[in-house]
Image (tube, grey):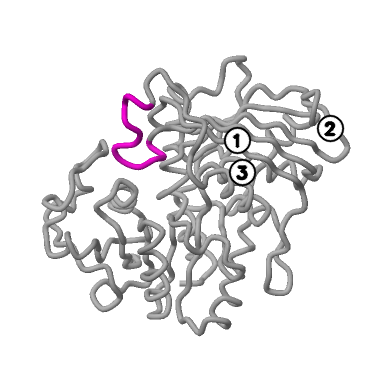
Amino acid sequence: MTKIPVTVLGATGVVGQRFVRRLAHHPLFEIAHLAASERSSGKRYADACAWRLDGEAYGGFADRVLDPGDPQHALAPIVFSALDTEPARELEPAFAAAGSLVFSNASAFRMAPDVPLLIPEVNAGHLALLKTQRSARGWRGGIVCNPNCTATMLAMALAPLHAAFGVEAVLMVSLQAVSGAGYPGVPSLDILGNVVPFIRNEEPKVEEELPKLLGALAEGAIASGVFSISALCHRVAVIDGHTEAVSVRLRGNPSPEAVREVFARWKPGPRLPSSPEAVVRLHEAEDRPQPRLDVEADGGLSIHIGRIRPCPVLGLKFSLLGHNTERGAAAASILNAELAAAEGLL
């Protein structure tokens, strides 16, 4: 089968490197362009950045010459964007207008009303919003965003509960890994032996994105989920893996046993090439899930739930874990592109 050519924007950064590693042997996609800033374009990939990941160095593309990150030099049917927010505001629409379907890890367009904010297991139907977007903007391509990493884990845990019972209120306290701050993360003298109770823009992102993620598509627009949410986000001395302490009020106040049964029976579709064996992994041990023991399971694409128990304030509480730089970043965009391919949108 002929593979679909793709471009990786921001290929030299750590998220860009994760795109390259996952795409190097992908069954549907092949890398046509590795694109970078003006400072790095024209250089060999190996000369433009230090490879920070395990596995094959540079994904086997060490000698690939980097292209400029614009549609004139790096156009492909699919573009994976690992750009920072400000460059994304300029470059992602340029690629979309030129005909590329851009799968973005950046926050620039997540809350635009005509841009799908997508998790295939949660709201695959929102991909139909591309029709509205193309009509409104006159694009031949389009932009599809994956959510903030912390919001991703929370939405995946709440989606089956929202479908089964209805979510009325959420309180989430996060303990977030230093890799979420990019490389080299947080300075050691700031994080070792410490907890930093502030991550810029993180709490508003979670509180804004979750209702859109759990909303319903109707007449070419998303009707946001109606529930209250409060997020409190902290940086902790963990390398990979965001842990979230979640309290939730569900309609009808179901028992922990009923909630556990809903998680156990949740089989979201469609099945995609990168889908994990188990989207939700339930843990029975009182001291699980833990980042060191659990976060790498299924290539970092599962979420882990444990300690499901009564909450005296909201009714139910549980512990949640997910891989912030895989399920919360590059791998999420690739799953979204696989969904678009399955839906015949490429």
Of circles 3 and 1, the one toward us is 1
Q: Which residue sits at x=45%, y=22%?
A: 293
Given residues 27 and 51, the one toward you in this image is 51
Q: Which residue sits at x=46%, y=81%?
A: 140
Q: Earlier in the sequence, mark 2 or mark 3?
A: 3
* Range covered by the magenta-colored residues: 179-190
Q: Position of residue 69 (x, y in %)?
A: 27, 68
Given residues 112 and 52, the one toward you in this image is 112
Q: Earlier in the sequence, mark 3 or mark 1?
A: 3
Residue that extends furthest to the right in the rendered view of this protein = 252
Q: Earlier in the sequence, mark 2 or mark 1?
A: 1
Q: Which residue sits at x=38%, y=67%?
A: 78
Question: Is 111 drawn above or below residue 148 in the view shown?
Answer: below
Q: Is residue 38 left or right of residue 16?
A: left
Residue position for label 2 = 254
Q: Position of residue 245 (x, y in %)?
A: 62, 29
Q: Position of residue 52 (x, y in %)?
A: 24, 39
Residue 102 location, quadrant: bottom left
Three-letter residue code for mark 1: Leu
Given residues 302 and 98, the one toward you in this image is 98
Residue position for label 1 = 232
Residue 123 location, quadrant: bottom right
Question: Is 92 drawn above or below residue 239 in the view shown?
Answer: below
Q: Which mark, by number, is residue 44?
A: none
Q: Is residue 186 magenta?
A: yes
Q: Which residue sits at x=43%, y=32%?
A: 177
Three-letter residue code for mark 2: Pro
